[in-house]
Image (cartoon, coloured by chain):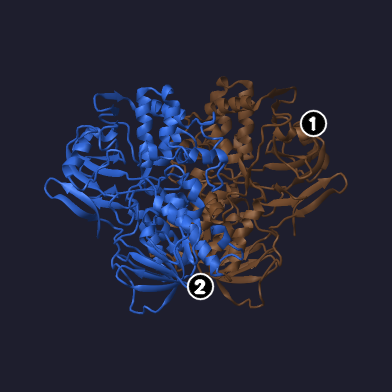
Chain colours: A brown, B blue
Amino acid sequence: MASRDGFSWTEEDGLKPGVPCIGAIQPPSNLTSAHDVTYDVIVAGAGYCGLTAARDAAVAGLKVLLLEGRDRIGGRSWSSNIGGYPFEMGGTWVFWGQPNVWREIMRYQMQDELEVSYDFSRGINEYHISNGRTTQRFTHDEEDKIVESGLRKLVNVDGAYGKNVIPFSHTSKFSSEAIKLDSMSVADRLAEIQDSLTPNERLAVESFVLLCSGGTLETTSVFEFLHWWALCAYSYEGCIDYLVKYKFRGGQSSFAIRFFQEALATGNLTYAFNSPITTVRNTTAGVEVTTRQAQRFKARRMISAIPLNVLNNVTFDPPLPQGKQAAASIGHVNQCVKVHAEVRDRDLRSYTGISYPHNGLFYALGDGETPSGNTHIVAFGGQHNHFEPDEDIEVTKKALQGLTPMNIKRIVFHNWSKDEFAKGAWFFPGPGLLSNHLNDMRACHGKVFFASSDWALGWRSFIDGAIEEGTRAALAVRNDLGRGEHVPMRSKLA
Amino acid sequence: MASRDGFSWTEEDGLKPGVPCIGAIQPPSNLTSAHDVTYDVIVAGAGYCGLTAARDAAVAGLKVLLLEGRDRIGGRSWSSNIGGYPFEMGGTWVFWGQPNVWREIMRYQMQDELEVSYDFSRGINEYHISNGRTTQRFTHDEEDKIVESGLRKLVNVDGAYGKNVIPFSHTSKFSSEAIKLDSMSVADRLAEIQDSLTPNERLAVESFVLLCSGGTLETTSVFEFLHWWALCAYSYEGCIDYLVKYKFRGGQSSFAIRFFQEALATGNLTYAFNSPITTVRNTTAGVEVTTRQAQRFKARRMISAIPLNVLNNVTFDPPLPQGKQAAASIGHVNQCVKVHAEVRDRDLRSYTGISYPHNGLFYALGDGETPSGNTHIVAFGGQHNHFEPDEDIEVTKKALQGLTPMNIKRIVFHNWSKDEFAKGAWFFPGPGLLSNHLNDMRACHGKVFFASSDWALGWRSFIDGAIEEGTRAALAVRNDLGRGEHVPMRSKLA
């Protein structure tokens, strides 16, 4: 199985679109000719949010139609297995303190199918800071000290390292202090503390923040960065554990497919890939949805798991409320460029480094060892020095070499900025978006329920947030159809 | 609504059995006379594990019969609301890093219904250490330093504060080092480090360990204590957050009842309280279950959520495998005595203290303020100096006064040691039980699936572990009945 998504490059084959993926479902649809059926719920989008919603609804006995624009499941989290080794094209890491994702891992009994990404025991066991003129080399212990010290200065907005302004990280009820911080950019905050940061702390902190936001320092909300920090137990050690520690040996698609298979096994799931939605009409009876191929489907309710940055691509009738439209027009700022390199340098397994602010890719780490013994390097770029990795592979290679010299055998990536169904990577808000529009993003519109990691309350932007939201939406639809609890959940969704 | 369980005492009314509880379900059964039905699954036990299993199975369309010996839901976690204030009779605290419980809190959108237990801002804002001869007074910052310093000495079995021996806290695959530590008691470990502990550290650490295990130092497995420590992010701060921070404003029963209501709303749930199971017979077609009232029920499968310490009260035909019987005979060691006092001393809101080893209750903290402005103190005793709080209320009062002088208005408690359906509080293993029998406890027996927090992999002993296990069992039964995923899950349950 292969997806149209993603690119791979080798010296022999050059740059080729499309990569192998177990999440590319065959057959691509199980629709029958009986098009006159009214489904209980149409779920738009087969990322983790849509998959969770479709699975939960199908398991609960609702007749579900899952529509997906792509040829695969997983949305912004999917893996390509090349030569027996998984490359994570988007969302990758999980941790047991992420409640929704961990609940699913335990439920599918996949807890022993995880491995630790980094291995600080071999070869060039170093952290490099390249600023375009010189490269300094540090031990990983020194790395920890530099990054932690810098981060603690950044997040100490309240004398309590963020604990006072965000005491509770899973709510939409923001304190006035939190709202104020959401109006600030990280650039603003750095201006406040610039005299206290050493030059290396400044480089390390800026690149860490940009690694989280995929934007620029000016477009990164201080509040949301603090929200991540709060989720990571208000500590640098927590950031490492939660953000980059465990990944699936079989890749994210080996996890996502469990949701799809479970939904399918109920007999309640109809699905169609390659079916982007163009219009959604609220009717008195429910919703009518049209796809790009002019197929029309009817359902009593709809769950839109369409990401914020592409929500305005769909025409809603009646139009979406102003606040939701405004949020979609503003969008989020993450234009992360994630590039995998399989390199022949076995010594790089324990390498981490930043090459900032001059280089196209500003952060990389040794992320694994391929079956042939090569090293897997994963590298990240953002909005500053942004480039399209598929347009000129020599530029991409130069950005990799600008991190540290490497003997590249293979390059694998997905260009999220050009992805018509995402227009960006994981959600990260600019200043003001959350305090002005979080509730707008979460609100229903007629019989359409909106669910996305982009507006989750807890691990917003993460796979965990996607599952949180898919869970919420499926239960809300069940309740709205009178199949769930005898409590008024609809108003609570808004 | 009131339950037979629990006791309350006031000067005016004396000691009275039974307390108000919204988890006491009316009517106590919705059984009809059509007794010849064969259910898809009988769930035995309506604690969080059984409730989760029953709910998930009912939502998935299985015909479920839930049998419970008590008159209420919640098992070892339930609350009594007295005068508008909830007293937690058993399991109390939750945290967002507990994956299963937090997933449910977000799913039911109860995240804003939590409050922080402690409030270190008022009155006698102190930590007391009473050793029977003197009482020393400390600030809470000093308390943190004493307990943390002592704990770090205790858990540093590997030079890495437990991270090397338990790098991953959600698995049944124990390393040889872990198995070795499971053969040791905390008394053994204390003997190794006794020269490094200050007298106050020793008192603080011993009482902390006993607060976790409800046993004695000799009957507390070092491995399991380290497992708790690992779950709490290997830190004292994590212990506070995970173990005692957030509780429900409406009490645990306000959470548990959501599971029951959701299951009931499916129309697939039949239930009967006051119906203890006496025998379970595996047949070729399924299971036949008999209750103490000699009612007989048939089902295709059964989920036993019966706790370890009372599993041998039920007669299985054919008998349970030797390993499971042995585990149940050994049992767990937790005989925690938890006593609530509503006291007129408003100054005690910010009090914490230990009175150890001489006193009947060795640990207490200010846990809230009642609507009438009184202070709520919660106190804990264990296996050493064990007493039955219902037998002589003067002894109970003396144990409370032995912590710190208090003007007692009301006492509320549940005697878990005398509870015929629990025979103890939350699970805590003595040395050897887990390494010898964890897989025995988790294994199926014919068509009976065994689920309990007592043998969860992650937050074993916690509400989270109960939900983990109920989730696992419901999915396993669905798969076994061919309703779930097309994968062989049965073997994975074993």
Residue A166 occupies quadrant: top left
Binning the other alpha carbons within 10 Å of mark 2 as few (below 14), some (14 to 19) or many (20 upward) gives few
Q: Vertical placement of B31 versus B240: above or below?
A: below
Type of amino acid under label 1: Pro
Q: Position of residue B168 (x, y in %)?
A: 55, 42
* In the image, farthest residue toward the left: B12
Locate residue A121 relative to residue A17 in the image: left or right.
left
Locate residue A61 relative to residue A294 in the image: left or right.
left
Write down the residue under mark 1. Answer: A405
Binning the other alpha carbons within 10 Å of mark 1 as few (below 14), some (14 to 19) or many (20 upward) gives few
User: Is B287 in front, or is B236?
Assistant: B287
Q: Mark 1 or mark 2, which is nearer the start of the sequence? A: 2
* Image quadrant where one finds the N terminus of chain A: bottom right
Q: Chain of mark 2?
A: A
Residue B106 visible in this rendered orientation of the protein = yes
Write down the residue under mark 2. Answer: A285
Q: Position of residue B214 (x, y in %)?
A: 35, 42
Q: Chain of mark 1?
A: A
**Under tag 1, what secondary structure?**
loop
Residue A182 visible in this rendered orientation of the protein = no
